[in-house]
Image (cartoon, grey):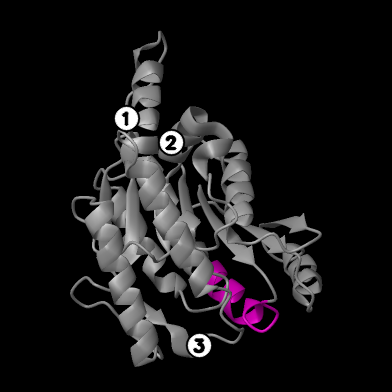
Amino acid sequence: MILVLLPAYNEAEALPLLLPKIGKVLGASGREYRILVCDDGSSDRTPELLEAYAREMPLEVLTHKYNRGLGETSRDLFERAIEICGPDDVIVRMDCDDTHEPEFIPKLIEKLDDGLDVVIASRFQPGGGQVGVGRYRAFISWCANVFMKVFFPVAGLREYSCGFRAYRAGTIIKSIEHFGNNFIQLKGFGFTCTLEKLVKLKLIGARFGEVAFVLRYDQKHSESKMVSSMTMLGYLILVICYHWPRGGWRSLWRDHVKRLESQPGGSGN
């Protein structure tokens, strides 16, 4: 099964564009699929639209009465995902604003089938890029990715901030079993959770890869949900917590993972 995760906040304009494209691409794949949306306290017509699409598609909706932010929304989506999925299933996380084209999903899954655990849609691979992103925003994004690569190097990765990813469900199951509610610790720091998941998955030995994709920011209909100052603060906190003192969370969680792996019945990667 392919399970698509969509965090949604005031996406009434994007949903009628995105959901039919997901249905078309995954319907043509010949594999069972489901869509899981978390409505994070939307104040527009998003709830009504999701209710209507749930009658037409294999779509389930989680609802936050109030807006809680991307960190808590991501946590709830992934925790519900492992209740639905088996280890051999695929979890695809996308943005809900129609900037991530579903046509790239088969390429992500094909790369997973080569033996990887996490595959990221990358603007920085040959053939990738972005449309509709201003020079200032593109520069900030490039700087952020360089910053992350310096402090959290992952072999084979150039794209750290894009949330469009495919995961082997068994890897997510293993990670949440290991870290529990701490799978995403910095829940209140916006898009920091996108990086934190990579860090946690690296600690359990996940294998990473990328495929080229084009970010279609020109198709974005809603306002950006990212608060840059809060996200950058989250990145700095993540660096401090994972590297200081004496190895920080990185050392703490690595030792935790090793203890779990050494216990009878502990799972390897």
* Rendered image: mark on residue 205: none
**In the image, residue 16 lies in the stretch drawn in magenta:** yes
Mark 3 crowd level (few <14, some 14–19, many ≥20, 10 Å Cα): some
Q: Is residue 59 above or below residue 130?
A: above
Find the magenta span and give its range.
11-24
Please name the residue that numbered disc 1 is placed on.
269
Secondary structure found at label 2: helix
Report x, y in % for residue 147: 28, 64
Residue 109 % position (x, y): 36, 55
- Can the viewer see residue 28? no
Pointer 3 residue: 219
Q: Is residue 85 left or right of residue 162?
A: right
Residue type at numbered disc 2: Gly
Residue 99 in view: yes
The image quarter containing residue 201 is: top left
Q: Which element carries disc 1, helix, strand or loop?
A: loop
Q: Residue furthest front?
A: 245
Q: Give the Cα separation between the discs numbered 1 and 3.
A: 38 Å
